[in-house]
Image: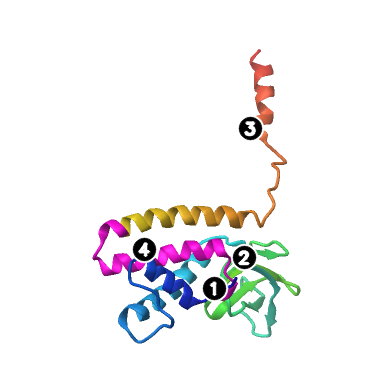
Amino acid sequence: MPFTKVQIISRAFNLIGKGSISNIGTDQLSAAASDAFDLLLEADLSGGMWRFAADIIQLNQLVQVPIDSRFRYIYQLPSDYLKLIRLYPQTWDFEIYKDGKIYTNVNNNLFLEYIRMVDVTALPPYFVKYITHELASWLAASNAQQPALTQYLDQKTDIYRSQAMAFDAQNRPQTPMVSAPVISNRFIATVIAD
């Protein structure tokens, strides 16, 4: 079931004992909650490696010529870009500059794996649970009326963030360690020592 921004804020209000809301009104608390939610959502998405927010797209090469002589090509990053995961073909020869431009020497067919801004209704339930508690903790701290509640919500938020990250990590298969030189060389060191 998709959740809306109003539902998430309403649940956060319930956690701090403020009662449910049916819309984001003009009152100070719901307006502050709406602003805080937008900030927290973007900060959380850009601060983690959330697989539900990951996407791969082909970048558009611009005709503009870079001023910096180290690079020959400029590509436009997508408008929903928050954080780079990697480029395909794999390269470390790039710089990201203002206005969502990436300068590189890779010509044509540059793909970007990145974390993007996700619509609230596309957030998975485990992330909604976490961000609801994070928002409630933020609101409880900003009200500064119940420090014990803030501390309790902070602890719950940490637990729910860890759970959400564990659930989200299941969306990417584990890769086995192919090379373990430290372990492999233990036998050699033992033979040499004898």
Q: Nearer the viewer, mark 3 or mark 4?
A: 4
Q: CA distance from mark 3 to mark 2?
A: 35 Å
**Residue 182, placed above or below residue 152:** above
> How far from the left and from the top, in percent, is residue 49?
57, 60
Q: Is residue 171 magenta?
A: no
Q: Outermost residue, left direction? A: 145
- Dot 2: what SS? helix
Residue placed under numbered mark 3 in the picture: 182
Residue placed under numbered mark 1 in the picture: 3
> How far from the left and from the top, in percent, is residue 82?
55, 71
- Taking the image as shown, residue 35 lies to the left or right of residue 80, namely left
At label 3, which amino acid type do we have? Val
The residues colored magenta run: 121-149
Q: CA distance from mark 3 to mark 4?
A: 44 Å
Residue at 33% from the left image edge and 71% from the top image edge: 18
Which quarter shows the C terminus?
top right
- In primary-sequence order, the first of circles 2 and 4 is 2
At label 2, which amino acid type do we have? Phe
- Do tag 4 and tag 1 residues touch (Cβ < 8 Å)? no
> How far from the left and from the top, in percent, is residue 109?
76, 73
- In primary-sequence order, the first of circles 3 and 2 is 2
- Dot 3: what SS? helix
**Residue 146, placed above or below residue 187:** below
Q: CA distance from mark 2 to mark 4?
A: 24 Å
Q: Nearer the viewer, mark 4 or mark 1?
A: 1
Residue at 30% from the left image edge and 65% from the top image edge: 141
Residue placed under numbered mark 4 in the picture: 137
> How far from the left and from the top, in percent, is residue 61?
69, 80
At label 1, which amino acid type do we have? Phe
Q: CA distance from mark 1 to mark 2?
A: 15 Å
Q: Is residue 126 magenta?
A: yes
- In primary-sequence order, the first of circles 1 and 2 is 1
